[in-house]
Image (spheres, rainbow, N blue to C red):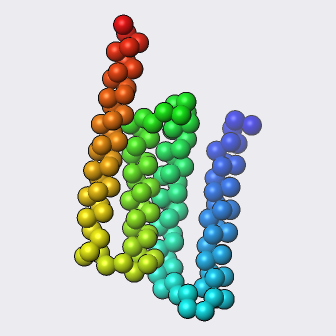
Amino acid sequence: MGRYCGRERSSWFVGIVLIAVGLIFLLRNTVWGFALDNWWALFILIPAAGSFGTAWNLYRKNNGRMTQAAIGPLMGGLFGLFVAGVFLFNLNWGRIWPVFLILAGLGALGKAMVRQDEDREDKSQSA
């Protein structure tokens, strides 16, 4: 079972993504006034969701504690989600580009906070 665990997870993920994309197209075709001009941006969500999945697995692997290894994929997922949202909702890049700075700052703070927690844990274990 351990050998196929990754494949089963990716199958679930692919299934959920296909259902979501199908629902979006169904809404587009049936609901009046709903237009998704940049539908191709949905494909940006695939690697973003993969990054979130990686971050979640690293978080669980460390007994529910955030690590520096999990911060990177988490921030990558947030960046991908943001970019996809900008394209999907036709937002103005000129107005919302500061969100990239905010996300980068959150990533730096997250790594710093995790590093402090890891340093405290290392000191307490060595004492």
Q: Position of residue 16 (x, y in %)?
A: 66, 62
**Along the line of sight, which residue is nearer the eye, 4 or 104?**
104
Residue shown at 66% from the left, 49% from the top = 9
Q: Position of residue 38 (x, y in %)?
A: 46, 81
Badge count: 0
The quarter of the picture where residue 11 lies is bottom right
63 vs 82, left or right, is right
Q: Quadrant of the N terminus?
A: top right
31 vs 119, left or right, is right
Q: Quadrant of the C terminus?
A: top left
Q: Is residue 24 above or below residue 35?
A: above
The quarter of the picture where residue 6 lies is top right
Q: Position of residue 64 (x, y in %)?
A: 53, 34
Residue shown at 60% from the left, 85% from the top = 28
The quarter of the picture where residue 79 lies is bottom left
Residue shown at 37% from the left, 18% from the top = 122
Please identify the residue farthest to the bottom as the structure is shown: 32
Q: Is residue 29 above or below residue 106?
A: below
**Along the line of sight, which residue is nearer the eye, 2 or 45?**
45
Please identify the residue farthest to the top as the structure is shown: 127
**Along the line of sight, which residue is nearer the eye, 118 or 48?**
118
Q: Position of residue 21 (x, y in %)?
A: 61, 73
Residue shown at 38% from the left, 14% from the top = 124
Q: Is residue 75 above or below residue 65?
A: below
Q: Is residue 96 above or below residue 27?
A: above
6 vs 89, left or right, is right
